[in-house]
Image (spheres, grey):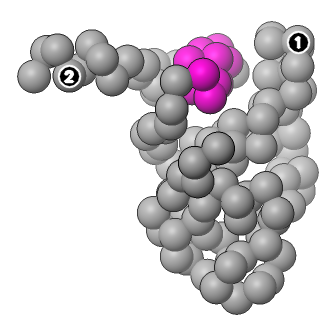
Amino acid sequence: MADGVFAGLCPACGGDLTFAEVESSTCKSTGGRLCSFGFDDEFERVLGFFEAAVGASPRVFQKLWGYVSLRRELAAVAPTGMGKTSFSTVMALFLGEERLQIIPYSFRRRSL
């Protein structure tokens, strides 16, 4: 899988964060351990809600998206089949507010 980059989202150093770093839970720049998902009660509720709604645990990057989206706005850009739609639908249901907007890239590209 191609390695994605989340600009400025590394919780250890504040630099860019890659899928490889998320999966290994280690910051390449500092060698430090990345944050552990699970210290936050609201995040634990998101994980449980996701599992109940989808019938499977979220992928590691869906966990990252969930963690980030509870704290600030998030634009999830990833290849087809990575779980963007299922993630954003579950988060919209969990949050119960009009906070997320799902726009497939192909639609956006045609409308420009």
Direction from residue 85 to residue 50 in the image, left or right: right
* Magenta stretch, overall SS: helix
In this rendering, does residue 112 appear at all? yes
Frontmost residue, 3 versus 38: 3
Tell me which numbered mark, 2 or 1, is placed earlier along the sequence.
1
Q: Residue furthest left?
A: 112
Frontmost residue, 7 versus 78: 78
Is 35 located above or below residue 56 in the figure?
Answer: below
Query: Which residue carries the number 1 mark?
Result: 55
Q: Give the amino acid type for the residue marked by disc 1 in the picture.
A: Gly
Query: Which residue carries the number 2 mark?
Result: 109
Is 67 located above or below residue 96 in the figure?
Answer: below
Q: Position of residue 108 (x, y in %)?
A: 23, 20
- The stretch in magenta equals 81-93
Q: Give the amino acid type for the residue marked by disc 2 in the picture.
A: Arg
Residue 83 belongs to magenta span: yes
User: Total marks drawn?
Assistant: 2
Name the residue located 89 percent from the left edge and 51 percent from the top edge: 38
Q: Position of residue 70 (x, y in %)?
A: 62, 43
Name the residue located 70 percent from the left edge and 60 percent from the top edge: 20
Residue 70 belongs to magenta span: no
* Separation (CA) of disc 2 from disc 1: 32 Å
